[in-house]
Image (cartoon, grey):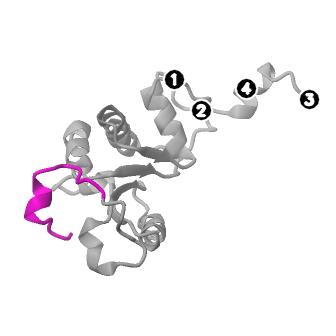
Amino acid sequence: SVPSSPTRAASPRPPLRPSTDWTTDLDDYHERPVVGLAVGADPMKGAAYAGALYMCGLRVKLLDFSRFTSVPGLLPSPVLAAVSALKGLHGIIFTGGGDIDPEMQGLPTGDPTVTGVLPGRDRFETEICRRAIDDGTPVLGICRGMQLINFTQGGTLFQDIDRDVAPFNKIGR
C-alpha cells in the first residue's frame, strides 16, 4: 500500500488531472486514478485484471471481502467493510464468478443450476455497489458483475435461462 500525500487526505476522491498521460508518466503514479477491483477470493483473477488495468495507467485496489477483517475466517459487517473499501476510489469494476446467493434474492435455495455461491462476497459487493452508485462513483460489471449491479438496483435475475425464460420466448420456437 502506497501512503497518500497530505493534500490527497482531505478529499476521499481526488480530482483527476486530464492533462496527465497516465500510460507513460511513471513519475505521476500517485496522481493516477484508483480503480477498485472486486474479484472475490481468486488471487489469480485479481492479478490478471490488476495487471491489465495497470498497463492502462490505473492504480488498482483489490476488494476481496476476506481482506476486510482482522480475524481469519470471520467476515466483517458488509456495511463497515464497504465504507472502508470505497475510500479514495475513482471507480469500481465488479468481475465474474459464481451465482448470486438466491436467498438474498428471496428465492428458494437448493436449485442444482445455481453454482459457486459465496454469500459473504455477495453481501460485501452488494453493499459496495449500492454505496458507490449512491455516491456517484462509476461502476462497471463484467458477467456476474453486471448481474450484481442489476440486482442492487432492484432488477431481477433468472436462475436458469433455459428453464425460466424459454417458455416466454416465442421467437424462433
For mark 3, give the secondary structure.
Answer: loop
Residue located beneath label 1 in the image: 107
Q: Amino acid at mark 4?
A: Val
State the mark number for residue 165. Answer: 4
Q: Residue at x 53, y 51 (%)?
A: 96
Q: Amino acid at mark 2?
A: Asp
State the mark number for residue 111. Answer: 2
Residue located beneath label 3 in the image: 172
In the shown orientation, is residue 96 left or right of residue 33? right
For mark 1, give the secondary structure.
Answer: loop
Q: Is residue 134 magenta?
A: no
Label 3 crowd bin: few (<14), some (14–19), many (20+), radius 10 Å? few
Q: CA distance from mark 4 to mark 3?
A: 13 Å
Specify the quadrant of the image occupied by residue 54: bottom left
Q: Is residue 10 visible?
A: yes
- Labels 4, 3: front one: 3
